[in-house]
Image: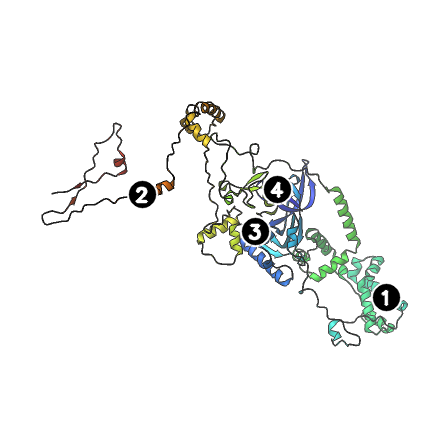
Amino acid sequence: YVYFENSSSNPYLIRRIEELNKTASGNVEAKVVCFYRRRDISNTLIMLADKHAKEIEEESETTVEADLTDKQKHQLKHRELFLSRQYESLPATHIRGKCSVALLNETESVLSYLDKEDTFFYSLVYDPSLKTLLADKGEIRVGPRYQADIPEMLLEGESDEREQSKLEIKVWDPNSPLTDRQIDQFLVVARAVGTFARALDCSSSVRQPSLHMSAAAASRDITLFHAMDTLYRHSYDLSSAISVLVPLGGPVLCRDEMEEWSASEASLFEEALEKYGKDFNDIRQDFLPWKSLTSIIEYYYMWKTTDRYVQQKRLKAAEAESKLKQVYIPTYSKPNPNQISTSNGKPGTVNGAVGTTFQPQNPLLGRACESCYATQSHQWYSWGPPNMQCRLCAICWLYWKKYGGLKMPTQSEEDKLSSSPTTEDPRVRSHVSRQAMQGMPVRNTGSPKSAVKTRQAFFLHTTYFTKFARQVCKNTLRLRQAARRPFVAINYAAIRAEYADRHAELSGSPLKSKNTRKPLACIIGYLEIHPAKKPNVIRSTPSLQTPATKRMLTTPNHTSLSILGKRNYSHHNGLDELTCCVSD
């Protein structure tokens, strides 16, 4: 089991190498079996897989999911894989390391998989073409459904009240009156009768044309079992048992599955075994539908005792010797395209601001890694869509590549794990779940409104040196020209040198800061001493002699335009003053 890398930003592929082949160009390709992660299948199948896992937990006595923390539940999903019958060929140069994949052991705790590095488990088989999940045929049948209940041991003198006929059928009595020599002589007679019966049978004479083949077939276990069963049924009476071996119709012929199967059926079975292995259900379904499953299994174990099996085993061993058994893969040392480059480990500067960097007041806002929220790492990697500007530290990046997820559960996954209903907007909730489903980064800011990470903003912190340099070094800095060419770097070394020279000249007359705003405490004290006075508004009372006041809108005056034909502020914004005419 190895890791394959097919993309610099996506997690590794987990594959099982079946064989290594050398191409005509000299490259080495690996024929592999595909394993899929939870992120590779649909949500409908994930729900079926979770339902299957819950049924297994209810039947077994291992650690249930309720005993796990949210972090353990989150990381355990990254260890679950789905086996497939799909094969593909990949270049061996894309191998990035080894891993371990095992069938889910129901007798062990699920925490054992988290304690081991590069360890995965599977319990279901995924069909990529049909989009279905099936239980693996090779599951370990451990549990109360498969094991018998052992009764308590009987005490001395205590009788067994169970009905023995329902528990077992007796087929042999070791305390028989016959000696071992007499039993062996009877078995020789049974083999001779079986050889004579095959000589009389037409179909058997075609399959075993020689006497040696007929005698070998008559010496198989089916003949011996029939002879011993005949002895027991006739109470170990040799004369009565021999007469039963040769009844009136002719000698008794006992044949097992090796003789019942034809040569064409045997060839089909060997071809199916080469393709499916010991998956007898698929062998019966695709190659031998007219045979029963019991017949196929019985034929397989008899076939392993024949010379045909030994010959095929030798051919496979010789073929394996000619193939590649191992290949040397050097350590992959090329830089990842997602690696974020830094200049000597120091962040870049903007507009000559050297010496100080902006530190956020709240350390929670400075979480750089989207997984562990670490702010320091020897290497950073960009992660997620480019517009979201997310990054991971070196440890979390390796975890993402191996296990296909983040170490810590995101806000949306915590909402899924909690069973309490929420009153969020359904559109926001569906958007968050869709992002989490597609593997997009989600910010865990703790805000209850939304967990979606918006576009990252920045704050340009201007140092005091930069503020003074703008006033002192105006001739060298030339802010207007720099603003028209924002991508041209400013020579901050020259500005710094000029400021050092000018600073010696202006040491006697320091610069006055334009910011003369008084502190808030002084303003509040001034307002307490000098309260604001309300203006007296004179309102005229209407009388019979005095007509009502008339308000008239004056016509806009467009004659007060400048030389260039531009309107003033009031004309441009439609804020012409309203004039009131009061008639006497």
**How far, Cα to Cα, is label 4 from label 3?**
19 Å
Which badge, 2 or 4, comes first in the chain's sequence? 4
Other residues around mark 2 within 10 Å, as few (<14) / some (14–19) / many (≥20)? few
* Residue occupied by mark 4: 5
Disc 1 target residue: 187
Q: Which residue position is annotated with label 3?
A: 41
* Residue 250 visible in this rendered orientation of the protein: no
Q: How is the image coloured?
A: rainbow
First of labels 4, 3 by sequence position: 4
Q: How far apart are marks 1 and 2 (CA)?
A: 129 Å
Rendered-image quadrant of the C terminus? top left
Indicate the position of residue 43 as horizontal and vertical percent values: 54, 53
Name the amino acid, label 4: Glu
> Which numbered tag is attached to residue 529?
2
Q: Is residue 82 above or below residue 242?
A: above
Residue placed most toward the observer, 86 or 309: 86
For numbered disc 2, what is the local secondary structure? helix
